[in-house]
Amino acid sequence: MIRVQSERFDAAAETAALLRTARGAGAVASFVGVVRGDSGEGRVAILELEHHPRFTLAVLEAIGSEARRRFDLVGLAIVHRHGAMPAGDPIVFVGAAARHRRSAFEAVDYLMDRLKVEAPFWKREHGSGGVRWVEPGPGDRADRARWDVMETDHSQA
Amino acid sequence: MKVLFFGRLAELAGTREQVVDLPAAVADIGALRDWIAADRPLLREALHAGGTAVLVNDALGRGSAPVSEADEVAFLPIVSGG
């Protein structure tokens, strides 16, 4: 299940839904990203995300497919929000179901690293420093690059 | 033709969406990029600086990809995230 929506999500309900459809799962790992109340530029009141209704979803689906293949997942969920969100709001949910825990943990880590750098969302912070566009930093790119040299076979993990 | 701008490009274009009558001479993405930004220097600079992806009917296209009146074209900054 991969969705882009403006509404808040319920992480527990998303995890339960993932578990219902993940046949053969021995582990589910999940992650919730939250709008941080501060950035390098000061206090952040609102984070605003713009997306392209079809292209953004297509990119998320491509990233999800790659994660399924790479980590031999039996279930996957990505829920990403768009629109204006106050600090403290959940912004992204990622869940991965696998036969064994290591694949589930790693898939979630992998998905988040790729989403941070590649998911087409255009982000603006509204806060004490005024309004500013947010772009991935060198740390995000380094996190993403880790996976380029770490292809391993998880089917027997 | 419907032309969409995303992120910072919408700010530079002064709009997120624009419906235009395409001149016959504008037949590919490269020509559209020049024509659409002709009277908006900041937008022109941004579209030529690299870092912009172009979708024609939701599919990524290069500068030589053909465009026509019935298409929807979107200009997007490829840098996003954070």
Image (cartoon, coloured by chain):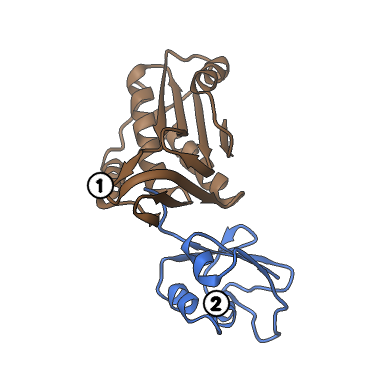
Chain colours: A brown, B blue
Q: Quadrant of the N terminus of chain A?
A: top right
Task: Give me the residue at 53% from left, 51% from top.
Answer: A50
Q: Is residue A157 visible?
A: no
Place residue B60 in its image quadrant: bottom right
Q: For numbered disc 1, what is the local secondary structure?
A: helix
Chain of residue at mark 2: B
According to the image, label 1 marks what residue?
Answer: A139
Place residue A37 in its image quadrant: top left
Q: Position of residue A136 (x, y in %)?
A: 34, 51
Task: Give me the residue at 51% from left, 29% from top.
Answer: A77
Residue closest to the eye, B70 or B6: B6
Judged left or right of residue A145, residue A20 is right
Q: Position of residue B75 (x, y in %)?
A: 54, 65
The amino acid sitting under disc 1 is Gly
Residue closest to the eye, A86 or B39: A86
Q: Quadrant of the C terminus of chain A?
A: top left
Q: Position of residue A107 (x, y in %)?
A: 38, 30
- Pointer 2: residues within 10 angstroms few (<14), some, or many (20+)? some
According to the image, label 2 marks what residue?
Answer: B33
Whether discs 1 and 2 lie on one chain: the answer is no
Q: For numbered disc 2, what is the local secondary structure?
A: helix
- Pointer 1: residues within 10 angstroms few (<14), some, or many (20+)? few
- The correct choice, above or below, for B37 with respect to A103 in the image is below
Chain of residue at mark 1: A
Q: Which mark is residue A149?
A: none
Residue closest to the eye, B40 or A31: B40
C-alpha span from label 1 to label 2:
33 Å
- The correct choice, above or below, for A102 with respect to A83 in the image is above
- The correct choice, above or below, for B36 with respect to A29 in the image is below
The amino acid sitting under disc 2 is Arg
